[in-house]
Image (tube, grey):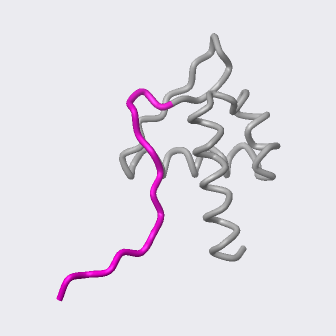
Amino acid sequence: MSLEKQIERLKYLDFLIQGKRTGTPKELACKLHLSERQTFEIINKMKIMGAPIQYCHQSRSYHYTENVFLEICFKRKNN
């Protein structure tokens, strides 16, 4: 899979989590066109990187427990 596709998938996942619209893990996997296992792996990697993600059984969605946002960009260094 191309890097661009992976980044777009990650941005979409962040969008769904921000809006608390992921659905169940199975539904989320379908939305991302991944297996549940692959979806869990991505979420776990995001958690390792500091994303405060939690699943709520009542709302049946993942959400962030703190106010965060995903930023993927290049920035110029000052020499």
What secondary structure is the stretch in magenta mostly built from?
A: loop
Query: From this viewpoint, which residue is outermost toward the top?
Result: 58
Please say whether residue 8 is one of the residues in the magenta stretch. no
- Number of numbered labels in the structure image: 0
Snapshot quadrant of residue 11: bottom right
From what the image shows, is residue 58 above or below residue 70? above
- Examine the structure image and report whether residue 77 is included in the region drawn in magenta: yes
Asked if residue 10 lies left or right of residue 64, the reply is right
Using the image, determine if residue 11 lies above or below residue 21.
Answer: below
Report x, y in % for residue 50. Answer: 36, 46
Q: In the drawing, does residue 27 fall left or right of residue 56?
A: right
- Residue in the image at 36% along x and 75% along y: 75
Q: Is residue 78 left or right of residue 17?
A: left
Instruction: Decide which of 28, 70 is in the foreground and name it.
Output: 70
Residue furthest to the left in view is 79
Q: Which one is in front, 69 or 9?
A: 69
Question: Which residue is more in the foreground, 10 or 67?
Answer: 67
Which residue is pictured at 42% across the width and 43% down the height? 51
**Quadrant of the drawing holding the N terminus:** bottom right
Report the front residue among 46 and 66: 66
Residue 69 location (% of width, % of height): 45, 45
Judged from this view, the residue extending furthest toward the bottom is 79
The span shown in magenta is: 64-79
Query: Measured from the top left, where is residue 39 in percent x and y?
Result: 66, 47
At horizontal 75% and vertical 43% (from top left) the residue drawn is: 29
Question: Considering the image in quadrants, where does the C terminus appear?
Answer: bottom left
Q: Is residue 22 above or below residue 75?
A: above
Residue found at x 66% / y 61% = 8
Q: Is residue 52 left or right of residue 24?
A: left
